[in-house]
Amino acid sequence: MNAPPLPEAPDGDVAGGYAGPAHGKSTARLLPATRFSGPIPWVIAILMALVVIAAAGGLALRNLATSAGSQLSSAVTVQVIEPNPDLRLARGEQAVRVLTGLDSVQAVRLVPEAELVALLEPWLGAGAASGDVPIPALIDVELKQRAGAAEIAQIEAALAETVPGARVDAQSDWLRPVYGALAALQWLAVGLIGLVALATAAAVWLAARNAFAGARDTVEIIHLLGATDRQIAAVFLRTVLHEAAFGALVGAAMGAGAVWLLGQQFAALDSGMTSGGGLALADWLVIAAVPLAGVLLALLTARITIALALRDML
């Protein structure tokens, strides 16, 4: 917002709503037409881009945590620990029969040893397939309801007599630290959005005060001519609206482009964990509301700033 020159309109209207003597139709503007040449629209654009990225990240993390929680809430892993490979296989098959007979169990799968070796090979190297490292038999169990303490205790009691050495774990317990990290990142995104909102309000506050200071003499004259505080504030708010809308739209476009590129990178990983963090239509609607919220914040900040400046002047 540039400092405006002192307008002269002896027979016209003062922009902003004040009507002088109706002897002509020429209009003098308190502020010059917006050309987006100042830094404020671009500052708002950068801040809006950061908000869009932070909001998209927070929503993606929420979707990821929700998806992982829903998929693993009823999942249980049974490990049959036995050094003897022949006895380990027999006990694993016996555990499958016992688990299949339980009313609370929906599906049971004995993980093939070759699949376990492939999973452990990146960490154990050739030792995973050599037989030197005893690999427990692993059974994936899907329950009909959430895997709580009572369900775990029931499975342990059913396996205690026929399959000694069996260990039962809820898969959601393994990812509890991951859930905590995802929640912390979501709160970090919320905090970043709050800080950016404060920075946006501060930038608009400084710009509005500078614009008002540059037009102080003009404001005093048109106020003496009968213009109200509301009419004077409307002149400044019109410029703020134009600049904030331009900056918000540009920033939203930049942020959405960055989010799309990041989404393509994560999609290329082809990981089941990251696939649950996609953005749905409702999430994009929330992101689309970010520039609108930014414009409203800028208008509110400018209105308060001009009102306080007018009160101090008058």
Image (tube, rainbow, N blue to C red):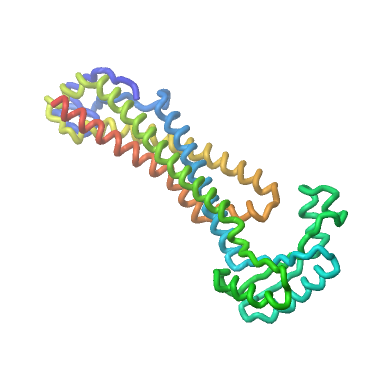
Q: Nearer the viewer, residue 227 or 43?
A: 43
Instruction: Please state, as top left, top right, bottom left or bottom right, where the N terminus lies in the image.
Output: top left
* Residue 253 drawn above or below residue 276: above
Residue 22 visible, this orientation: no
* Residue 180 drawn above or below residue 91: above
* Residue 30 drawn above or below residue 301: above
Relative placement, left or right, of 258 versus 13 is right
Q: Residue at x 18, y 29 (%)?
A: 310
* Quarter of image, res 290: top left
Instruction: Please state, as top left, top right, bottom left or bottom right, where the C terminus lies in the image.
Output: top left
* Quarter of image, res 235: top left
x, y percentage for residue 143?
Answer: 62, 73
Q: Residue at x 60, y 68 (%)?
A: 74
x, y percentage for residue 73?
Answer: 58, 65
x, y percentage for residue 187?
Answer: 46, 46
Q: Nearer the viewer, residue 177 or 10?
A: 177
x, y percentage for residue 97?
Answer: 74, 78
Q: Nearer the viewer, residue 111 or 168?
A: 168
Q: Residue at x 25, y 35 (%)?
A: 304
Relative placement, left or right, of 246 versus 24 is right
